[in-house]
Image (cartoon, rainbow, N blue to C red):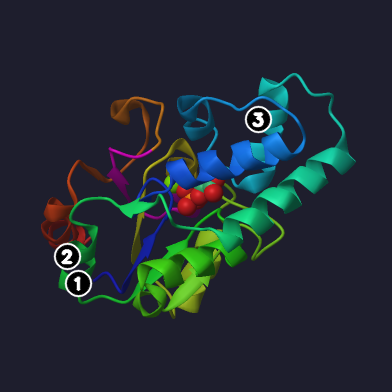
Amino acid sequence: MTRALIFDLDGTLVDSAPDIHAGVNAILAEQGLAPLPFDTVRGFIGGGVPILITRVMRALDLPEDPARHADMAAAFTARYEHDPGGLTRPYPGVEAALDALTLPLALCTNKPEGPTRALLAHLGWTDRFAALVCGDSLPVRKPDPAPLHHAIAAMGGGPVLFVGDSEVDAETAARAGVPLLLFTQGYRKTPVTDLPHHAAFDHWQDFPALVSRAGDV
Ligand SMILES: O=C(O)COP(=O)(O)O
Ligand SMILES: [Mg+2]
């Protein structure tokens, strides 16, 4: 029987792209650079801040400069931690679904720990999760399976179900050998049928029943 549920955060539990977009454009403005469109930045989410900043720099044709990359990543993370949730909303039905679950819950996100904790506090969600594994908790991030393995260990061991929205989450789950429940309304770019997953769902109101059905895998 399933012993815990482990959740991705961005694009799965919350639509955080508006705040990430605002944060990216704020640091670009500080450097006198042009803003990027919302859909462009939304498409850059999923691999964590270092990959986000690499994609932003490439989109602006900035030269590859590790020191500038590090500065922009640090500036973005600090700004995001300071202002984590003004534009961020849980997806419809998330809070009712989490309230209905009786299994212990954990987070495995590529968002750094500072902004993650700030966003959880903003949402009043700090006590919902028994363990957090964030993008800077380990030397590697998803899709390396280590963060998911780490979250499973923090919950006292499996079996668990992992809930995510993206290509990164599907690869993480496959490499970790953990069943994925795929939320289809997040930041995925690949068709659902092309991503390995155990089950997919479009609406959070369907999630508790899906967990009950998937609970015996
Ligand atoms: O911050 C990101 O790029 C992605 O975060 P997530 O792992 O919660 O989707
Ligand atoms: Mg995600």
For disc 1, does the CB lie below 8 Å from ligand 1? no
Indicate which disc, 3 or 2, sits on the residue closer to the N terminus.
3
The image shows residue 117 at horizontal and vertical percentages of 52, 69
From what the image shows, is residue 15 above or below residue 1? Answer: above
Residue, x 43% and y 48% (percent of image)?
A: 16
Disc 2 is placed on an element classified as helix
User: What's under tag 3, amino acid-wise?
Assistant: Arg
From what the image shows, is residue 56 above or below residue 159? Answer: above
Mark 1 and mark 2 in contact (Cβ < 8 Å)? yes
Residue, x 69% and y 35% (percent of image)?
A: 28
One can see residue 46 in this view: no
The image shows residue 93 at horizontal and vertical percentages of 18, 56
User: What's under tag 1, amino acid-wise?
Assistant: Asp
Indicate which disc, 3 or 1, sits on the residue closer to the N terminus.
3
Seen from the viewer's position, the closer of residues 161 and 207 is 207
- Identify residue for label 2: 96
Q: Which mark is residue 99?
A: 1
Q: CA distance from mark 2 to mark 1?
A: 5 Å
Residue, x 41% and y 49% (percent of image)?
A: 87
Viewed as shown, does residue 185 lie left or right of 203? Answer: right
Identify the magenta region: 173-186
Q: Which mark is residue 195?
A: none
- Identify residue for label 3: 55
Viewed as shown, does residue 26 lie left or right of 39? Answer: right
Disc 1 is placed on an element classified as helix
User: What's under tag 2, amino acid-wise?
Assistant: Ala
Residue, x 36% and y 72% (percent of image)?
A: 125
Seen from the viewer's position, the closer of residues 126 and 184 is 126
